[in-house]
Image (cartoon, grey):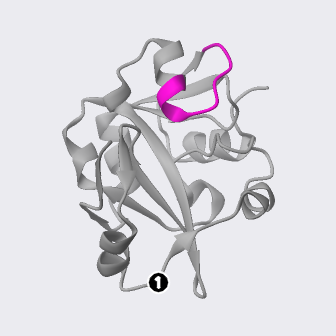
Amino acid sequence: MSISNTLQRFLTSHNVTYEVITHPYSETSMASAQTAHVPVERMVKAVVLKDEKGYVIAAIPSTNHLNLREINQAMKRQLALASEEELCELFGDCSAGAIPAVGEAFGMPTIWDEQLAYEPDFYLEGGDHQELVHISHYDFMEMMKSCPHGTFSAHN
């Protein structure tokens, strides 16, 4: 498998320069970073949330866990985790557990954790369990410039 076609089209249409990093199969963002030999603090994971208004992707450092209370206060919503079944429906060209942290590519709002603002570059899941997408700090911030942000995750 290669990176998600949806993600690839989005990156190309937004003139994002990216590199695909292939690595041995892994189940989690942290494991993907480790098997790809990239800094885990630069790995961005997607947490898909939902409420009666719809879905949202929270982009957070892979070394962190999401604080739902904080994100609900920031968004003024009552978000909860989306189910695996919902993820399969929403991200048809992605494997479960390998969702790219770029909601706009899938027509979904994104909120990003401000802790990401300090990294020089980023690695995202590419949509399968064997490829990461490496992008510059500038390109990531350009993609996120119209997205809300705050501090709503903490180091594991």
Could you tell whether 21 is left or right of 77 in the image? right
Residue 121 image offset from top left, x and y in percent: 32, 29
Give above or below for 63 relative to 68: above
Give above or below for 30 relative to 4: above
Per the rendered image, the range of residues in magenta is 23-31
| Residue 24 colored in magenta in the image | yes
Quadrant for the C terminus in the image: top left
Residue 28 image offset from top left, x and y in percent: 57, 33
**Figure quadrant of residue 91:** bottom right
Amino acid marked by disc 1 = Gln
Q: Say which residue appears at 74% left-offset and 27% top-offset.
A: 2
Q: Secondary structure at mark 1?
A: loop
Would you say residue 33 is visible in this rendering?
A: yes
Outermost residue on the left side: it is 118
Residue 15 image offset from top left, x and y in percent: 49, 40
Give above or below for 156 relative to 136: below
| Residue closer to the observer: 114 or 106 | 114
Give above or below for 139 relative to 20: below
Quadrant for the N terminus in the image: top right
Would you say residue 55 is visible in this rendering?
A: no
Outermost residue on the front side: it is 156
